[in-house]
Every structure is written in C-alpha cells, then in structure tokens.
C-alpha cells in the first residue's frame, strides 16, 4: 500500500463537505482510505507520525487543504490520482457555484441580503474567527462562534466588547443554541416552553432539553456560551449575562445552568448572581468538588438526568420522573446479556461523541471506585496514553486529537466504527457504551453507520466464543429529522440496549460490568 498527497492552495471546506468528500474518495476502486486535513504544522506532524505525509503534503501551507490517499499497490496510481483530482475539482466548482449564486461572501453582504438580521454565526478556521466576530459585533450583531482553536485572550476581548455593546458573544467552540425557537449548530427539535438554559456544554444542553421534551416541557431560550466561559480567565461573562436576560424574560419560568466544573472565581460570580434571581434555578456543574452554596430557590444537581427531573418537578410534575421517549429495557433482556458475558469479560469501553456525556459517565464510574482511563483530565483518572489495558476506558472522540482535519464524530462515525471493531478483539472487553446525538447538523442516519459495525463486532466476538453488550444512549426527540423511533428500532434489532438517558446508559454498563443487576432495577419497567 502506498500513500499520495494532493495539496489544494487556499482551500477550506466545512466538516460536512469533508465527510462527503472522504466517503466519495474511499468508494473509488483502488483507494483504501482518504484523510482530508488543513495544512497546519500540527496537522502535518500528525500525518507524518501516521506515515501519511509525502513531499507534496510537506510543501502545503496552513491555508491549504491536504488530501492524503492510501492506494492499493496493485492498481494504476496515476489513473487513481487523476480520478481523485477530478472528484475534488468537481466538488470545488459545485461549491463555488453555490456560494456565488446563493451565499453572501462577507458579513456586509449578508446584512445587505438580510437587513433585519440580529445574529451572526461564525464558522471559519479558528485563526480568522476572532476577526470576523469583531466585524459582526461592530455592526451591532449578536454573535455565535462555532469555530474552535480561538485563543482565550481573543475570547476575553470579544466578550468584553460584546458586553460593552449590550450584545451576546456565544462561544468560541459553541456547538449548540436555540434562540427564539431557532436551532443553531447541533440542536434538537424541542418545543417552545418555559425553561431557559445557559450552558457551557453543548451535549449537556441537548441532553437536558431532550429529557424535558420527552415529558412535554419546552425551551424558551437555550444559550450555549462556549466551553471556556466559566474559566476564571473568562469569568463566566456570557453565563452571567444569560442569567440576567432569562431572569427578565417573561417567557422563562425556570433557569437551568449546565457546565463542567467552573473556576473558583467564576463559581463565586455565578453564586452571587443567583442570589438576586427571582426565578427558581437548577444548577448542574458536573464534578464540582466544592460544597454547593445554600441559596434560596437554587437547586444543585449532580447529573444531567437529575437536573431534568428537578426542572420537571418545579414545573408542576409531582413525580419528578423524566418519562423517556424510548421504553426502558426489560430486566429479563439485561439478565440474558449479563449471563452471556464471560467472567473475565467485564471491561467497559465508552466511545463518545459528546464530551459532557463522557465526563458525566466518568464521574459516575469513578464514584463507584471503577479503575478508569480517559482522555478527559480529572483527578484519580488515568490517561489513556499511559495506562495498561486492564481498565475501563471512557473516550471523548470529539476531542481535538480525534478531530484534527476530520469531521466531528456527531457527523462522521468512521473513527468510532474502527474503534468498535478494535475493542471487539479484546477478550477482556464486554461492554461497549456509545452515544448517538440526533438533531439538526448531526448525521442523517446514525443507525446505518453503527448497525454494520455492531453486527461485525458481534461476529468477531462470537467467533472467539464471546459475546458483547452494546449500550446506546440516544439523545434526541420524536421531532428530530433522523426519526428516533426508527433509529432505536434498528439498533435494537442489531442487539443493542437503547436508552434515552446517559445516566441510565452508564448505570446499565456498570451493572453488567460487576454482574449485579440490582443496581439498575429502578431503571427497568
């Protein structure tokens, strides 16, 4: 097998187009694999480590797009590369035609076409995002920065600039928001309602809003503020502004705050702001070590599921029990799965696209004294780079190390499919825990990607006399474009246990791991 590189000068494609292009190239006869990545120094170093960088790729600059193609040695390399070049040229002409006919090329052009707009969504390479966001703020627009790789210094400056003008600056790395009923980034089809959410966590926001939607409760506003907003350097600037705005909003009855642990000073600022809020508030800061402050009408919850339950109770549901979109698995099914696992086959592999869901699962298993490895940084948790194989592993596959130059795992399931098959060959792995995030912007049919991988993994395991348990957490609603019932039915038919709550999923995984289903009897019907 040989590798060839093509470098496209001054070319940028978004994640969806990169996924489509990669899949098209991989389907060509003679192409064993395709990686499409920007020509930054870090990306080139990664390609070189993987043995995928050629002299053509080394000559690429940061604004160039590198196409690394693995070729079957038995085929005509020149003919294959000609077909690759033709495919890329055709895609580029199509993109230019669409852009020139349908899409403004600048913020001023967009405002000329849509003069009543009041928000700009910025999704450009990180080194340009701050410049474009500043232009939008200067024109009186609220801003949502979807881009990552923006410096924290730029983030602080942008948010101060926005506050001085009475504007929101959501992000950078803001993946989810629902503003005036309009979903932005990765978001689910949830009803309008009385709950206002401010979150430094995209998938945390999605999980809580979907659990509430399943019980009939809707969202007034959902503001994603970016994963670093509650760092001490940023100081919770946009979460504080979100609290203020939602407290004044006549359509919001309950305020929800979601984040990983805030910095100590940011946490104090949030607590101070909550003391003067007139509405009940639910706070879920996952893994917050400090004692939760005692603030009237403020409820601190340890998990996303419990946060949703608390909100439901505050809205008048006396059961405090979030009704799932999907039925809970029967205990008889779970007992059959548990009985099929070998005594030494009890390790969990959590392969997540949602970093907050991975974080929540890590905290849950850590508190049960499970020996865990992860790429998430947390006390008493091993690094996946340093650990031995004999640990439970929870991996955020949306982390930068997995998304350099490739689409996010909510969009592209290739890396997770490969990892599932790898774990299926490990005789000590028994439980594979996955999340599937539905909604706008996510993969149109996740089951079509996962079912073949699950079937192949189960065949690999059965060929070695083993079984595998698959637990799939589906975060979505009945109105999402992917059809949650169809997704669940196809995954269930492949032998997976499908649940709507991440806490439910990791609880089942833990119970199967230790062989004690009494741990989860309350989850079953």
Image (spheres, rainbow, N blue to C red):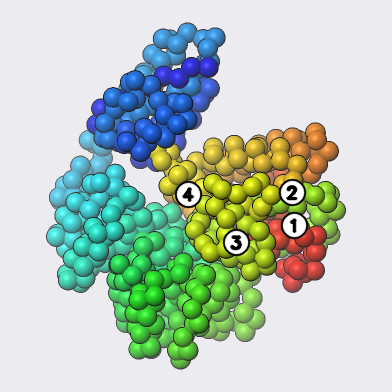
Q: Quadrant of residue 48?
A: top left
Q: Nearer the viewer, mark 1 or mark 4?
A: 1
Q: Position of residue 502 (x, y in %)?
A: 60, 62
Report how far apart the C-alphas of labels 4 and 3 lie in the structure: 15 Å
Could you say where residue 514 lies in the image, as x and y percent from the top left?
Answer: 77, 60
**Of pointers 1 and 4, the one earlier in the residue sequence:** 4
Give the structural element (helix, strand or loop) at label 2. Answer: strand
- Say above or below: 44 vs 274: above
Q: Is 154 situated left or right of 498 in this image?
A: left
Q: Give the quarter of the figure containing the C terminus.
A: bottom right
In the rendering, at what x and y percent does residue 446 appear?
A: 57, 44
| SS at mark 1 in the image | helix
Apparent side of residue 511 relative to residue 59 in the rendered image (left or right):
right
N-terminal of the pair, mark 3 or mark 2, is 3
Residue 441 image point, x, y percent: 44, 49
Q: Earlier in the sequence, mark 1 or mark 3?
A: 3
Residue at 21% x, 70% y is: 163
Q: Which residue is mark 2?
A: 430
* Towards the viewer: 10 or 183: 10
**Residue linked to disc 1:** 513
- Are there few (<14), some (14-19), or many (20+) residues within 10 Å of tag 3? many
Q: Earlier in the sequence, mark 4 or mark 2?
A: 4
Q: Is residue 72 above or below residue 145?
A: above
Q: Secondary structure at mark 3?
A: helix
Labels 1 and 2: the sequence-earlier one: 2
Query: Farthest residue toward the bottom?
Result: 296
Specify whether 514 is left or right of 390. right
Tell me the residue that label 3 is attached to. Answer: 361
Q: Are marks 1 and 2 in contact (CB under 8 Å)?
A: yes
Residue pointed to by mark 4: 398
Please name the residue shown 47% across and 43% down the image.
402
User: Which mark, by number, is residue 18?
Assistant: none
């Amino acid at each position: 097998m040989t590798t060839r590189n093509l470098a496209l000068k001054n070319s940028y494609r978004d994640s969806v187009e990169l996924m489509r292009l990669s899949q098209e190239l991989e389907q060509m006869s003679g192409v064993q694999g395709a990686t499409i990545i920007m020509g930054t120094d870090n990306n080139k170093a990664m390609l070189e480590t993987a043995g995928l960088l050629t002299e053509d790729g080394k000559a690429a600059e940061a604004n160039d797009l590198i196409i690394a193609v693995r070729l079957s040695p038995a085929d005509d390399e020149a003919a294959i590369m000609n077909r690759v070049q033709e495919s890329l040229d055709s895609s580029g002409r199509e993109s230019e035609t669409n852009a020139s006919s349908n899409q403004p090329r600048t913020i001023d052009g967009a405002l000329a076409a849509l003069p009543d707009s009041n928000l700009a969504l910025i999704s450009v390479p990180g080194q340009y995002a701050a410049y474009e966001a500043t232009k939008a703020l200067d024109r009186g627009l609220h801003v949502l920065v979807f881009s990552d790789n923006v410096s924290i210094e730029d983030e602080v400056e942008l948010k101060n600039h926005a506050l001085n003008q009475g504007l929101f600056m959501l992000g950078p790395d803001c993946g989810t928001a629902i503003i005036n009923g309009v979903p932005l980034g990765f978001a689910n089809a949830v009803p309008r309602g009385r709950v206002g959410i401010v979150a430094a966590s995209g998938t945390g926001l999605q999980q809580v809003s979907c659990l509430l939607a399943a019980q009939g409760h809707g969202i007034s506003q959902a503001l994603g503020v970016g994963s670093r907003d509650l760092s001490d350097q940023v100081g919770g600037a946009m979460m504080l502004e979100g609290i203020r705005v939602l407290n004044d909003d006549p359509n919001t009855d309950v305020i929800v705050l979601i984040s990983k642990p805030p910095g100590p000073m940011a946490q104090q600022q949030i607590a101070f702001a909550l003391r003067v809020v007139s509405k009940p508030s639910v706070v879920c800061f996952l893994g917050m070590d400090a004692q939760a402050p005692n603030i009237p009408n403020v409820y601190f919850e340890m998990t996303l599921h419990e946060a949703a339950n608390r909100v439901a109770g505050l809205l008048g549901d006396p059961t405090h029990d979030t009704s799932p979109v999907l039925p809970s698995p029967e205990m008889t099914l779970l007992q059959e799965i548990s009985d099929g696992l070998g005594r030494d086959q009890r390790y969990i592999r959590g392969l997540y696209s949602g970093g907050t869901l991975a974080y929540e699962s890590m905290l849950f298993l850590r508190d049960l004294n499970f020996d865990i490895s992860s790429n998430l940084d947390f006390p008493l948790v091993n690094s996946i780079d340093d650990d031995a194989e004999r640990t439970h592993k929870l991996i955020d596959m949306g982390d930068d190390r997995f998304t350099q130059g490739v689409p996010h795992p909510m969009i592209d399931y290739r890396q997770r499919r490969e990892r599932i098959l790898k774990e299926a060959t490990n005789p000590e792995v028994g439980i594979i825990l996955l999340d599937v995030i539905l909604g706008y912007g996510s993969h149109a049919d996740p089951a079509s990607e996962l079912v073949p991988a699950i079937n192949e993994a189960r065949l690999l395991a059965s060929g070695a006399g083993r079984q595998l348990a698959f637990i799939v957490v589906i975060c979505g609603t009945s109105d999402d474009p992917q059809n949650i019932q169809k997704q669940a039915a196809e995954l269930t038919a492949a032998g997976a246990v499908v649940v709507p709550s991440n806490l439910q999923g990791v609880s089942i995984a833990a119970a199967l791991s230790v062989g004690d289903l009494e741990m989860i009897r309350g989850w079953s019907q």
